[in-house]
Image (tube, rainbow, N blue to C red):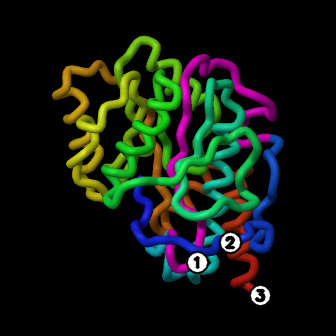
Protein backbone atom coordinates (compact mmCIF):
# COMPACT_ATOMS: atom_id res chain seq x y z
CA UNK A 1 0.00 0.00 0.00
CA UNK A 2 2.12 2.79 -1.32
CA UNK A 3 0.22 5.48 -3.28
CA UNK A 4 2.34 8.47 -4.30
CA UNK A 5 1.61 11.76 -2.55
CA UNK A 6 1.33 14.09 -5.56
CA UNK A 7 -1.96 15.69 -6.52
CA UNK A 8 -3.76 14.43 -9.63
CA UNK A 9 -5.56 16.02 -12.54
CA UNK A 10 -6.33 13.74 -15.45
CA UNK A 11 -6.62 9.97 -15.69
CA UNK A 12 -6.01 7.28 -18.28
CA UNK A 13 -8.76 5.53 -20.20
CA UNK A 14 -7.79 1.87 -19.75
CA UNK A 15 -9.59 0.80 -22.94
CA UNK A 16 -6.91 2.59 -24.94
CA UNK A 17 -4.24 0.38 -23.41
CA UNK A 18 -5.78 -3.07 -23.74
CA UNK A 19 -7.75 -3.00 -20.49
CA UNK A 20 -11.22 -4.54 -20.60
CA UNK A 21 -14.07 -2.58 -19.07
CA UNK A 22 -16.91 -3.95 -16.98
CA UNK A 23 -16.82 -6.95 -14.68
CA UNK A 24 -14.52 -9.70 -15.89
CA UNK A 25 -16.25 -13.10 -16.28
CA UNK A 26 -13.65 -14.87 -14.15
CA UNK A 27 -10.47 -13.92 -12.26
CA UNK A 28 -8.15 -16.33 -10.54
CA UNK A 29 -10.80 -19.04 -10.68
CA UNK A 30 -13.48 -16.84 -9.10
CA UNK A 31 -16.77 -17.11 -11.03
CA UNK A 32 -18.81 -14.06 -12.01
CA UNK A 33 -21.45 -12.86 -9.57
CA UNK A 34 -21.43 -11.79 -5.94
CA UNK A 35 -19.34 -13.68 -3.42
CA UNK A 36 -21.11 -14.85 -0.27
CA UNK A 37 -20.36 -13.45 3.14
CA UNK A 38 -19.45 -9.93 4.16
CA UNK A 39 -22.65 -9.17 6.06
CA UNK A 40 -22.57 -5.83 7.85
CA UNK A 41 -18.97 -5.10 6.96
CA UNK A 42 -17.75 -2.24 4.79
CA UNK A 43 -14.88 -2.30 2.30
CA UNK A 44 -12.88 0.79 1.37
CA UNK A 45 -10.49 1.02 -1.57
CA UNK A 46 -7.98 3.84 -1.16
CA UNK A 47 -6.65 4.94 -4.54
CA UNK A 48 -5.34 7.66 -6.79
CA UNK A 49 -6.68 8.62 -10.17
CA UNK A 50 -4.30 6.92 -12.66
CA UNK A 51 -2.57 9.96 -14.15
CA UNK A 52 0.59 9.50 -16.26
CA UNK A 53 3.65 10.64 -14.36
CA UNK A 54 1.83 10.65 -11.02
CA UNK A 55 1.13 6.98 -10.36
CA UNK A 56 3.41 3.95 -10.42
CA UNK A 57 6.48 6.12 -10.94
CA UNK A 58 8.74 3.25 -9.84
CA UNK A 59 7.66 1.41 -12.99
CA UNK A 60 9.37 4.07 -15.13
CA UNK A 61 11.62 2.92 -16.60
CA UNK A 62 11.24 0.42 -18.19
CA UNK A 63 7.65 1.51 -18.82
CA UNK A 64 6.67 4.94 -20.05
CA UNK A 65 4.54 7.13 -17.75
CA UNK A 66 1.49 6.42 -19.94
CA UNK A 67 2.09 2.67 -19.77
CA UNK A 68 2.60 2.80 -16.02
CA UNK A 69 -0.66 4.70 -15.64
CA UNK A 70 -2.44 2.12 -17.81
CA UNK A 71 -1.17 -0.63 -15.52
CA UNK A 72 -2.31 1.34 -12.48
CA UNK A 73 -5.74 1.81 -14.07
CA UNK A 74 -6.01 -1.92 -14.74
CA UNK A 75 -4.92 -2.79 -11.20
CA UNK A 76 -7.51 -0.41 -9.79
CA UNK A 77 -10.24 -1.86 -12.03
CA UNK A 78 -9.37 -5.41 -10.92
CA UNK A 79 -9.44 -4.39 -7.26
CA UNK A 80 -12.78 -2.60 -7.55
CA UNK A 81 -14.17 -5.60 -9.44
CA UNK A 82 -13.18 -7.95 -6.62
CA UNK A 83 -14.76 -5.65 -4.04
CA UNK A 84 -17.93 -5.25 -6.11
CA UNK A 85 -18.55 -9.00 -5.94
CA UNK A 86 -18.53 -9.11 -2.15
CA UNK A 87 -21.92 -8.80 -0.45
CA UNK A 88 -21.27 -6.11 2.14
CA UNK A 89 -23.19 -3.28 3.69
CA UNK A 90 -21.23 -0.58 1.87
CA UNK A 91 -18.45 -0.24 -0.71
CA UNK A 92 -16.41 2.96 -0.67
CA UNK A 93 -13.71 4.43 -2.89
CA UNK A 94 -11.50 6.91 -1.01
CA UNK A 95 -10.12 8.72 -4.02
CA UNK A 96 -7.45 11.30 -4.68
CA UNK A 97 -8.49 12.77 -8.01
CA UNK A 98 -11.46 12.19 -10.27
CA UNK A 99 -13.39 9.07 -11.15
CA UNK A 100 -13.07 7.38 -14.52
CA UNK A 101 -14.49 4.51 -16.60
CA UNK A 102 -12.78 2.04 -14.25
CA UNK A 103 -15.35 2.75 -11.49
CA UNK A 104 -18.17 0.15 -11.39
CA UNK A 105 -21.61 0.97 -9.97
CA UNK A 106 -22.35 0.47 -6.29
CA UNK A 107 -19.53 2.52 -4.79
CA UNK A 108 -19.72 5.62 -2.62
CA UNK A 109 -16.86 7.95 -3.57
CA UNK A 110 -15.22 10.01 -0.84
CA UNK A 111 -12.29 12.41 -1.21
CA UNK A 112 -9.13 11.56 0.63
CA UNK A 113 -8.11 13.84 3.49
CA UNK A 114 -4.72 14.42 5.06
CA UNK A 115 -1.15 14.78 3.90
CA UNK A 116 0.91 11.70 4.79
CA UNK A 117 -0.37 8.23 4.00
CA UNK A 118 -0.93 7.50 7.69
CA UNK A 119 -3.23 10.54 7.90
CA UNK A 120 -5.13 9.57 4.77
CA UNK A 121 -5.63 6.00 5.95
CA UNK A 122 -6.83 7.18 9.36
CA UNK A 123 -9.19 9.70 7.73
CA UNK A 124 -10.64 7.10 5.36
CA UNK A 125 -11.37 4.74 8.25
CA UNK A 126 -12.87 7.56 10.29
CA UNK A 127 -15.04 9.01 7.53
CA UNK A 128 -16.54 5.63 6.64
CA UNK A 129 -17.08 4.59 10.25
CA UNK A 130 -18.73 7.88 11.23
CA UNK A 131 -21.23 7.61 8.37
CA UNK A 132 -22.02 3.95 9.10
CA UNK A 133 -20.61 2.63 12.38
CA UNK A 134 -19.35 -0.91 12.02
CA UNK A 135 -16.31 -2.92 10.94
CA UNK A 136 -14.25 -1.47 8.09
CA UNK A 137 -11.81 -3.27 5.77
CA UNK A 138 -9.43 -1.10 3.74
CA UNK A 139 -7.38 -2.18 0.73
CA UNK A 140 -5.11 -0.32 -1.67
CA UNK A 141 -4.88 -0.48 -5.46
CA UNK A 142 -1.56 -2.31 -5.76
CA UNK A 143 -2.74 -5.95 -5.55
CA UNK A 144 -4.85 -6.71 -8.64
CA UNK A 145 -4.51 -10.43 -7.88
CA UNK A 146 -6.78 -10.12 -4.84
CA UNK A 147 -9.93 -12.25 -5.01
CA UNK A 148 -13.42 -11.75 -3.67
CA UNK A 149 -13.24 -14.82 -1.38
CA UNK A 150 -10.09 -13.41 0.18
CA UNK A 151 -11.90 -10.15 0.86
CA UNK A 152 -14.84 -12.06 2.32
CA UNK A 153 -12.47 -13.79 4.71
CA UNK A 154 -11.13 -10.40 5.79
CA UNK A 155 -14.59 -9.02 6.48
CA UNK A 156 -15.71 -12.18 8.26
CA UNK A 157 -12.57 -12.16 10.43
CA UNK A 158 -13.80 -8.96 12.06
CA UNK A 159 -16.76 -10.83 13.53
CA UNK A 160 -14.34 -12.66 15.85
CA UNK A 161 -11.24 -10.43 15.82
CA UNK A 162 -10.58 -6.77 16.57
CA UNK A 163 -8.42 -6.37 13.47
CA UNK A 164 -7.37 -8.19 10.33
CA UNK A 165 -4.02 -7.63 8.64
CA UNK A 166 -2.74 -8.52 5.17
CA UNK A 167 1.07 -8.36 5.00
CA UNK A 168 2.79 -7.46 1.73
CA UNK A 169 5.88 -9.18 0.42
CA UNK A 170 7.82 -5.90 0.40
CA UNK A 171 7.35 -5.39 4.14
CA UNK A 172 4.27 -3.20 3.93
CA UNK A 173 0.66 -4.28 4.07
CA UNK A 174 -2.00 -4.67 1.42
CA UNK A 175 -5.07 -4.77 3.67
CA UNK A 176 -6.09 -3.57 7.10
CA UNK A 177 -9.43 -4.15 8.77
CA UNK A 178 -10.64 -2.72 12.06
CA UNK A 179 -13.75 -3.58 14.02
CA UNK A 180 -13.65 -0.21 15.78
CA UNK A 181 -11.48 2.22 13.80
CA UNK A 182 -9.32 4.56 15.89
CA UNK A 183 -6.92 7.13 14.34
CA UNK A 184 -4.37 6.37 17.07
CA UNK A 185 -3.89 2.93 15.52
CA UNK A 186 -2.48 4.50 12.34
CA UNK A 187 -1.21 8.03 12.95
CA UNK A 188 2.54 8.16 13.25
CA UNK A 189 3.21 4.74 11.73
CA UNK A 190 6.08 5.31 9.22
CA UNK A 191 4.74 4.46 5.79
CA UNK A 192 6.31 3.19 2.55
CA UNK A 193 9.25 1.53 4.30
CA UNK A 194 10.34 -2.13 4.49
CA UNK A 195 9.37 -2.02 8.18
CA UNK A 196 5.92 -0.46 7.73
CA UNK A 197 4.00 -3.72 8.02
CA UNK A 198 5.84 -4.83 11.14
CA UNK A 199 5.35 -1.40 12.74
CA UNK A 200 1.65 -1.36 11.93
CA UNK A 201 1.14 -4.88 13.27
CA UNK A 202 3.08 -3.95 16.40
CA UNK A 203 0.82 -0.93 16.88
CA UNK A 204 -2.30 -3.08 16.68
CA UNK A 205 -1.01 -5.63 19.16
CA UNK A 206 0.31 -2.98 21.52
CA UNK A 207 -3.24 -1.63 21.71
CA UNK A 208 -4.35 -5.04 22.94
CA UNK A 209 -6.23 -5.95 19.76
CA UNK A 210 -6.71 -9.51 18.59
CA UNK A 211 -5.45 -9.69 15.00
CA UNK A 212 -6.32 -12.14 12.25
CA UNK A 213 -3.64 -12.59 9.59
CA UNK A 214 -4.25 -12.98 5.86
CA UNK A 215 -1.86 -14.46 3.27
CA UNK A 216 1.10 -12.43 2.07
CA UNK A 217 0.46 -10.75 -1.29
CA UNK A 218 2.87 -9.01 -3.61
CA UNK A 219 2.35 -5.30 -4.30
CA UNK A 220 3.00 -4.03 -7.82
CA UNK A 221 5.80 -1.50 -7.39
CA UNK A 222 8.43 -2.62 -9.92
CA UNK A 223 8.53 -4.22 -13.36
CA UNK A 224 9.51 -7.51 -11.72
CA UNK A 225 6.46 -7.25 -9.45
CA UNK A 226 4.24 -6.55 -12.46
CA UNK A 227 5.40 -9.68 -14.26
CA UNK A 228 4.99 -11.87 -11.16
CA UNK A 229 1.50 -10.57 -10.34
CA UNK A 230 0.33 -10.90 -13.95
CA UNK A 231 1.49 -14.52 -13.93
CA UNK A 232 -0.40 -15.10 -10.68
CA UNK A 233 -3.62 -13.59 -12.09
CA UNK A 234 -3.45 -14.37 -15.83
CA UNK A 235 -7.14 -13.61 -16.49
CA UNK A 236 -7.03 -10.18 -14.84
CA UNK A 237 -7.25 -6.83 -16.54
CA UNK A 238 -3.80 -6.15 -15.19
CA UNK A 239 -2.32 -9.16 -16.99
CA UNK A 240 -4.11 -8.14 -20.20
CA UNK A 241 -2.75 -4.60 -19.95
CA UNK A 242 0.80 -5.84 -19.38
CA UNK A 243 0.53 -8.27 -22.31
CA UNK A 244 -0.73 -5.44 -24.52
CA UNK A 245 2.23 -3.27 -23.59
CA UNK A 246 4.65 -6.11 -24.32
CA UNK A 247 3.07 -6.72 -27.73
CA UNK A 248 3.31 -3.04 -28.55
CA UNK A 249 6.97 -2.95 -27.55
CA UNK A 250 7.77 -5.97 -29.73
CA UNK A 251 6.45 -4.34 -32.90
Number of other residues with Cα within 10 Å of mark 3, as a class: few under 14, some 14 to 19, many 20 or more: few
What is the span of residues highlighted in magenta in the rendered image? 26-55
Element assignment for label 1: loop
Query: Which residue is identified by label 2?
Result: 12
Element assignment for label 2: loop
Residue 30, compared with residue 189, is above or below; it is above
Q: Main secondary structure of the magenta part?
A: loop
Q: Does residue 102 appear left or right of residue 142 in this picture?
A: right
Query: Which residue is identified by label 3?
Result: 251
| Residue at 50% from the left image edge and 49% from the top image edge | 46
Q: CA distance from mark 1 to mark 3?
A: 22 Å
The answer to the question of whether label 1 and label 2 lie on touching residues, with beta carbons closer than 8 A, is yes
Q: Position of residue 123 (x, y in %)?
A: 39, 45
> In the picture, residue 211 is in which quadrant?
top left
Residue 52, labelled with which disc? 1
Q: CA distance from mark 1 to mark 2?
A: 7 Å
Residue at the extreme bottom: 251
Viewer-nearest of discs 1 and 3: 1
State yes or no: residue 35 in magenta: yes
Q: Position of residue 221 (x, y in %)?
A: 45, 64
Determine if residue 193 is in view. yes
Of the residues under marks 1 and 3, which one precedes in the sequence?
A: 1
> In the picture, residue 200 is in which quadrant?
top left
Number of other residues with Cα within 10 Å of mark 1, as a class: few under 14, some 14 to 19, many 20 or more: many
| Residue at 38% from the left image edge and 46% from the top image edge | 121
Amino acid sequence: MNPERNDVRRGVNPERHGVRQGMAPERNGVPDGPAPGGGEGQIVVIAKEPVPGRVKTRLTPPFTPVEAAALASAALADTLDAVARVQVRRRVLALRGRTGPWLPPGFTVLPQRGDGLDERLAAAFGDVHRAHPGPVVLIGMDTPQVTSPLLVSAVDALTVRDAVFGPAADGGFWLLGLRRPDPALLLGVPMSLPTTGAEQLRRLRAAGLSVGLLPVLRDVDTAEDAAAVAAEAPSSRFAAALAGIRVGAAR
